Image (spheres, rainbow, N blue to C red):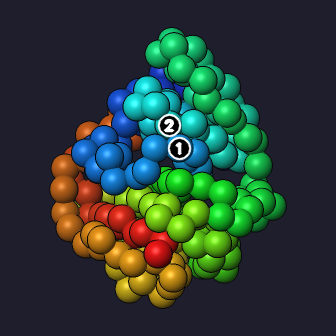
Amino acid sequence: MFWDEKFSADHYIYGTDPNDFLAAQAGAIPKGKVLCIGDGEGRNGVFLATQGYQVTSVDSSKVGLAKAQELAAEKGVTLNTVVADLNDFDIGENQWDGVVSIYCHLPAPLRQKVHGNVVRGLKPGGVMLLEAYTPKQLEYNMGGPPVVELMYTADILRRDLQGLQFEHLQELDREVIEGTHHYGMGAVVQLIGVKP
């Protein structure tokens, strides 16, 4: 499996520090239960656990999540990990104080399904925090999916996440320094959405 292979490197390919946008904005998420989708090697889930959240990290890669558990142990925190395909994972209803999606690029039908599930899964007052690459990322060629069909835009997210109020929704270029696999200028979309 593609991600198991990628994550079997002996280092954390995206580093062990959290994503910059998440680190800066985590305080927007109410304290409580947070779901990290596509959390890979766990850098973002573990960071949130160190901030006092009860975190569940979901990923299709058991190799990535095994590394996430090692990182959690190293940082002295508890992380609930679930190996699952997002197509099959039940987010539930009114369950989560926060849902975090960092570079979790999905094909359009699955993306729409998962984002719809996220809106249902958040508690009233719950927050979705997302950062993903936009189609312009293909010009920078330094990470992210190699095809435009897997990229996100502000308009796509606005449509997918109807039912959330957008506190922050912006496309921008920024330097992304994350391990060995995201390094350089990136074209991203960032979102903070609140369920009324």
Residue 95: x and y in percent read 66, 57
Residue type (three-letter) at the residue carrying disc 1: Gly
Q: Residue at x 41, y 59 (%)?
A: 129
Up the image or down, 2 lies above or below 153; here it is above
Q: Residue at x 53, y 68 (%)?
A: 124
Determine whether the residue tagged by mark 1 lies in a helix, strand or loop.
Answer: loop
Neighbours of disc 2 within 10 Å: few (<14), some (14-19), many (20+): many
Up the image or down, 60 lies above or below 154; here it is above
Residue 107: x and y in percent read 61, 72
Q: Which residue is mark 1?
A: 32
Residue 157: x and y in percent read 44, 78
Q: Residue at x 48, y 21 (%)?
A: 11
Q: Earlier in the sequence, mark 1 or mark 2?
A: 1
Q: Residue at x 43, y 50 (%)?
A: 30
Q: Are marks 1 and 2 in contact (CB under 8 Å)?
A: yes
- Residue sitting nearer the eye, 87 or 126: 126
* Left-right relation of 59 to 88: left
- The image quadrant where one finds the N terminus is top right
Instruction: Give the label on residue 53, or none.
Output: 2
Residue type (three-letter) at the residue carrying disc 2: Tyr
Neighbours of disc 1 within 10 Å: few (<14), some (14-19), many (20+): few
Q: How many angstroms separate mark 1 from mark 2 (CA)?
A: 5 Å
